[in-house]
Amino acid sequence: MSLHIKTYKDFEGVFQVVLEDGRSSLATLNFAPGKSVYGERLVKVGEDEYRLWNPHKSKLAAAILRNLPRLPIRPGSKLLYLGAASGTTVSHISDIVGTEGGIYAVEFSHRSLRELITNVSVFRRNVFPILSDARRPEKYRFLLEAVDGVYCDVAQREQAKIVADNAQKFLKKGGYALLAIKGRSIKSTGDLTKVFERELAVLKRRGFKIKKTVSLNPYDRAHVMALSKYQP
């Protein structure tokens, strides 16, 4: 069986690849052909090379498969990414935003930032690594332009506050935020429903309209992805 590829739903820049054995996978068009970031498979379809996108390693891929209704990240988007880690999801967003887009990738860990630079940004001129604490946006405000969206995946308490503080400084009015709420980073045991509700309430108080929340189970347990629009 030959490979087959099509756009996933109407998500510009996201594809569905049907593999030789009939299984399907999300994929993005490789911005750095020949380069794998985290051991993901590269597949050729005609003249194009695609990177399979593993939802067990990327909360954004998990959210898409868990019926995120739309993906506001598209070719040409400028994005502030908080909690970039070693760059797994950053690299797929890099594929999506392409030559005209850009990602300001904020990471606090020196080790993770080194991996982000070594494995991602040296091959992708649309990724700009920033060593800093996402809780202190004033520390990197001189490095950024206004952005279309904020993506947040930090293992901190007050995750929604971190998004809102950054949005206040950098996000265009009418822009969007994607917040991966890590319930167990806030409350280690017990029911997480109130944790999620509290974080969403913070976003609402700070000028966001919640468009959709999706559970990331079974890909990431105790996580929810919240899509919201900034209307201060």
Image (tube, rainbow, N blue to C red):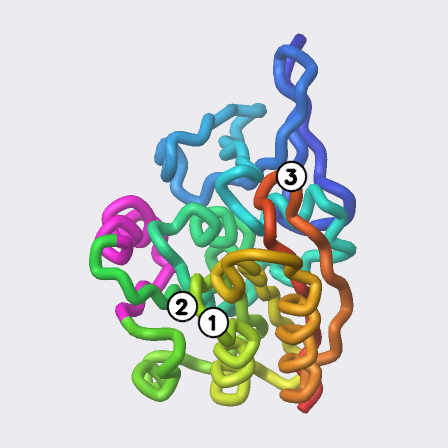
Q: Which residue is mark 1?
A: 157
- Kindly indicate the quadrant of the structure image that contains residue 218: top right
3 and 2 marks in contact (CB < 8 Å): no
Q: Name the one closer to the observer, 32 or 73.
A: 73
Q: Position of residue 94 (x, y in %)?
A: 47, 53
Distance from disc 3 to disc 2, alpha carbons, whole Å, reads: 29 Å
Q: Is residue 121 magenta?
A: yes
Q: Residue at x 30, y 52 (%)?
A: 116
Q: Is residue 69 above or below residue 19?
A: below
Say which element carries label 1.
Answer: loop
Residue 146 in sight here: no
* Circle nearer the N terminus (3, 2): 2
Q: Residue at x 46, y 57 (%)?
A: 99
Label 3 vs label 2, nearer the camera: 3
Label 1 vs label 2, nearer the camera: 1
Q: Which residue is mark 3?
A: 218
Highlighted magenta segment, given as a residue range: 112-131
Q: Name the one closer to the observer, 98 or 103.
A: 103
Q: Residue at x 60, y 52 (%)?
A: 222
